[in-house]
Amino acid sequence: MLPDWLSALRQSLRAGHAAVLVSVARTQGSAPRDAGTTMLVDATCCADTIGGGHLEFEAIREARAMLGCTSPVPRILRYNLGARLGQCCGGVVWLLFEQIPASDAPAWEARWAPIEAGNALERRLDAGASASSWALGAARQTRARLEGEASAWRFEQTLVAEDFPVYLFGAGHVARALVRQMLPLGAAITWVDTRDDGFDGQADLDGLHRLAPGRLRTQLTDTPEAEVAQAPAGSFFIIMTHSHALDFSLCEAVFRRRDFAYFGLIGSDTKRASFEGRLKARGLPPERLGELTCPIGIPGIPGKAPAEIALAVGAELMQVRYAHQLLKQAGQASRPHNTLLPE
C-alpha cells in the first residue's frame, strides 16, 4: 500500500502544478499522528491527513503560503498541541514543509515504476538545503527521524509500501461489506468466487475499484484452492462462501500452509466443532486447530447485519496486522533522539 499523498503528488506534477509536502518530523507526548505521516497540499486540494483539527488547518495555511513563494526553502515549525492552538492533545509536533515544484516532474516520473515495484523511497534533508535528496532503496520498514538543533538539523524518512494481502473467498453480502471496509485501510484484496454471477452488480464493483485503484482483484474460478496455494506468505485468508463443502475444502487448502498471518472462517461454534472433527479425521494435528479463527470478528458486536459483521471482522484483521508489525519491530536497535531540536 502506498499513501494517498504519493498518488496525489503524481497527479499534481503531471498537471504542471507545484505542491507542498507537510511531514510530521517528530512528536513528543500525545500527538494525533506518528512521525513520518505526510500530507500533500496544492492550490486546490489536500491528500492524506496529519491529524485534522486546528493543527491541520494551520499546516494547510502555511503550505498554501509557501506555494506563493518563488524560491521557498524547506522549514520546520514546532507546534504545541495546547489551548493556544485550539487542541487538547498536550504534546508537541514538529512539521516539515517542503515545496515540490512542477519542474521536478521528470525526476519523479523516473521513480514511479520502481516505487510501485516495491522499492523503498528514502528521503534526506539537512538544515539549509534547498530540497530533499530522494533515492530508491531496499529498506523494508517505514521510519522517520529528526535530530539536531535549530541551526543544524537533519530529517530522514523511509517510505515502504507495506504488504497487506487479503484473500477473501465468497462474494455474498458480508463479503461485499468487508471489501468496502478494508480497501480504505490499505488491504490488497484478491476476491474469489466460483459462481458465474458472483460479482454481478457492475456499478457497485466499479465503485469499489475506484475506491482503491489497483488494490482489488476479482477472480471467478472453478479451483479457488489454487488461489490459496499461490498467495504470498503473510496473507490474510477469510472464508465465507455460499457452500459449507467449499468452505471445508478451502480450510484444508489453507491448513496445507504454515505461513499465513490470519485464517478466518465465518460461522458458529457448532460449525467450528464440525469442521474440527473432520479435519482431525483427515490427519490434521490437533495442536494446529488453534490457527483457525471461527467465529470471526472482535467480541462485543453481536449484530447480524452484513455491515456490522464486516466491522467486527475488519477490526480483528487490523488488530492482527498491527500485532505482526509490532513483532517485527521488537528487539530492533534504536538510537536515542538528540534532545536539541528546532524551536
Image (spheres, grey):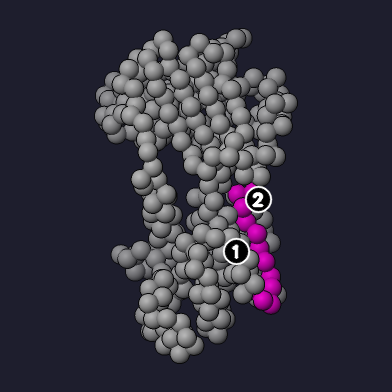
Q: Position of residue 216 (x, y in %)?
A: 62, 56
Image quadrant occupied by the C terminus: top left
Q: Residue at x 56, y 21 (%)?
A: 132
Q: Position of residue 197 (x, y in %)?
A: 68, 73
> In the image, is residue 217 part of the stretch drawn in magenta?
yes
Q: Quadrant of residue 288?
A: bottom left
For disc 1, the marked residue is 231
Residue 295 in view, yes or no? no
Q: Position of residue 178 (x, y in %)?
A: 50, 62
Residue type, label 1:
Ala
Q: Quadrant of residue 19?
A: top right
Q: Of 90 and 152, which appears nearest the observer?
A: 152
In the image, is residue 179 above or below residue 272?
Answer: above
Magenta region: which residues? Answer: 212-224
Residue found at the far bottom of this picture? 281
In the image, is residue 48 above or below residue 132?
Answer: below
Q: Residue at x 49, y 50 (%)?
A: 185
Which one is earlier in the sequence, the residue at label 2 or at label 1? 2
Describe the element under mark 2 as helix, strand or loop: loop
Q: Position of residue 110 (x, y in %)?
A: 72, 32
- Disc 2, disc 1: CB below 8 Å? no
Q: Residue at x 35, y 45 (%)?
A: 331
Q: Residue at x 39, y 81 (%)?
A: 286
Check residue 214 in the rendering and tell me which mark sits there, or answer none: 2
> In the image, is residue 100 part of the stretch drawn in magenta?
no
Residue type, label 2:
Gly
| In the displayed structure image, the side of residue 325 where residue 30 appears, left or right | left
In the image, is residue 6 above or below residue 261?
Answer: above
Describe the element under mark 1 as helix, strand or loop: loop
| In the displayed structure image, the side of residue 259 where residue 271 appears, left or right | left
Check residue 81 in the rendering and tell me which mark sits there, or answer none: none
| In the displayed structure image, the side of residue 46 where residue 58 appears, left or right | left
